[in-house]
Image (cartoon, helix red, strand yellow):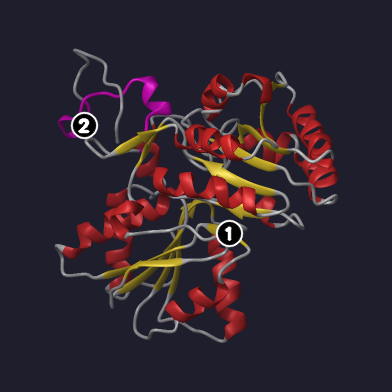
């Protein structure tokens, strides 16, 4: 993890330098990993140059959702609604009814919890063409439950008419933005902001709405993942290769509509456990969606496991520490996969 370190601080356990509170909002990129700045903001500017109906809206979080890039390029099409998320989404719905295409940004906790009913009634029920783009998904903030959107996928999956997208990296975010614009109707995207890792370009990846993609194959375990956990799964697969454990990784960026055909096809291969990895509570997200899909299709893998956040209010602290604590760091993911590929019992991490 890329973090800020307090100079001259006493060494922590195992000789590691102590992390300061700035690590609570650290980049999810590993040290030395390739990154790209503000991919959403730049992609939205490119889209707006081609489509004059595109608007940018936020609730006092332009800088923290990378929408400030759009505001600088198109100040007349940028709307700062203040700290009023319900107003943000109500206004976005009204503008969409007049033919505009608002991209409304805030933190995922505020959209999924504070303004849920306004999105449900004024956007989803009316099938308005509003694109909801939300930063700090899952455990990408160390500021505790008030800022950790551990249940947003479960909430938005349950909302009729709502497309739900959980992209992995900067390469995918750049492609998701125009894909959302091509979709006529409401959509919710989890946003990785700031210096966002580049991963999927190495796999010749192209995002398609509603499609899962097999990034690598392997006989020992199948990981079905979304969002930053696809990056973690790929990192874990590289670590496990040294132990002669070959892991398949199926990336599922669109949580709804779910690519059930691809999931069933990958899980039908016998002899390997199916492991769903997501940066979300194990309740109501990708893991349970995959389990239901396999059950309906009559597919029984060798074992089924979940790597995800617990059904609990999460701790505050430095992100690297929290990712280890909750089992979603690359090293912890690799350890879980190895144990299960060696024949461990089923269940959730």
Q: Which mark is residue 255?
A: 1
Q: Report x, y in % for residue 111.
A: 68, 37
Please state the extent of the stretch shown in magenta in the rendering.
Answer: 12-28
Task: Give me the residue at 28% from left, 74% from top.
Answer: 218
For marks 2 and 1, the one nearer the N-term is: 2
Instruction: Residue lying at the far top in this picture: please name it.
Output: 8
Asked if residue 101 is positioned above or below residue 187 in the image, the reply reads above
Q: Report x, y in % for residue 59.
A: 68, 24
Residue closer to the observer: 170 or 119? 170
Count of all numbered marks drawn on residues in the image: 2
Asked if residue 87 is positioned above or below residue 204 in the image, the reply reads above
Task: Give me the residue at 70% from left, 20% from top.
Answer: 83
In the structure shown, which secondary structural element does the residue marked by tag 1 occupy? strand
Asked if residue 341 is positioned above or below residue 207 in the image, the reply reads below
Nearer the viewer's eye, disc 2 or disc 1? 1
Q: Is residue 61 left or right of residue 328?
A: right
Q: Circle 2 sits on which residue?
A: 13
Residue 153 in sight from this viewpoint = no
Q: From mark 2 to mark 1, how far is it between C-alphas?
A: 39 Å
Residue 147 in sight from this viewpoint = yes
Q: Examine the image and state in which quarter residue 307 appears.
A: bottom left
Residue closer to the observer: 81 or 28? 81
Q: Is residue 213 magenta?
A: no
In the structure shown, which secondary structural element does the residue marked by tag 2 occupy? helix
Task: Give me the residue at 76% from left, 34% from top.
Answer: 92
Q: Report x, y in % for residue 259.
A: 56, 70
Quadrant where the C terminus is found in the figure? bottom left
Q: Give the crowd class for mark 1: few <14, some 14-19, many >=20 residues within 10 Å.
A: many
């Amino acid at each position: 993890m890329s973090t800020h370190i307090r100079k001259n601080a006493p060494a922590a356990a195992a000789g590691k330098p102590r992390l300061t509170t700035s690590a609570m909002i650290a980049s999810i990129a590993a040290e030395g990993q390739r990154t790209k700045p503000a991919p959403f903001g730049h992609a939205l500017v490119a889209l707006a140059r081609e489509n004059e109906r595109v608007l940018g809206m936020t609730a006092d979080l332009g800088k923290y959702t990378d929408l400030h890039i759009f505001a600088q390029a198109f100040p007349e099409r940028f709307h700062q609604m203040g700290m009023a998320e319900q107003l943000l989404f109500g206004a976005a719905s009204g503008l969409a009814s007049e033919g505009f295409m608002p991209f409304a940004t805030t933190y995922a906790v505020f959209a999924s919890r504070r303004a849920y009913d306004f999105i449900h009634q004024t956007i989803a029920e009316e099938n308005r063409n509003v694109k909801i783009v939300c930063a700090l998904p899952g455990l990408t903030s160390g500021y505790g439950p008030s800022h950790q959107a551990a249940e947003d996928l479960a909430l938005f999956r349950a909302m009729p008419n709502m497309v739900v997208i959980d992209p992995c990296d900067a390469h995918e975010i750049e492609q998701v933005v125009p894909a959302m614009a091509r979709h006529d109707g409401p959509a919710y995207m989890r946003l990785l902001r700031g210096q966002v890792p580049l991963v999927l370009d190495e796999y010749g990846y192209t995002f398609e709405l509603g499609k899962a993609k097999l990034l690598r194959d392997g006989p020992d375990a199948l990981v079905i993942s979304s969002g930053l956990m696809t990056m973690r799964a790929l990192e874990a697969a590289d670590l496990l290769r040294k132990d002669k454990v070959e892991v398949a990784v199926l990336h599922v960026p669109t949580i709804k509509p779910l690519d059930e055909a691809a999931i069933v096809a990958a899980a039908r291969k016998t002899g390997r456990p199916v492991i769903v990895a997501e940066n979300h509570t194990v309740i109501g997200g990708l893991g349970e969606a995959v389990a239901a899909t396999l059950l309906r299709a009559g597919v029984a893998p060798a074992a089924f496991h979940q790597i995800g956040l617990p059904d609990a209010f999460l701790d505050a602290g430095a992100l690297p520490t929290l990712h280890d604590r909750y089992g979603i760091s690359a090293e912890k993911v690799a350890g879980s996969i190895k144990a299960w590929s060696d024949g461990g019992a089923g269940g959730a991490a």
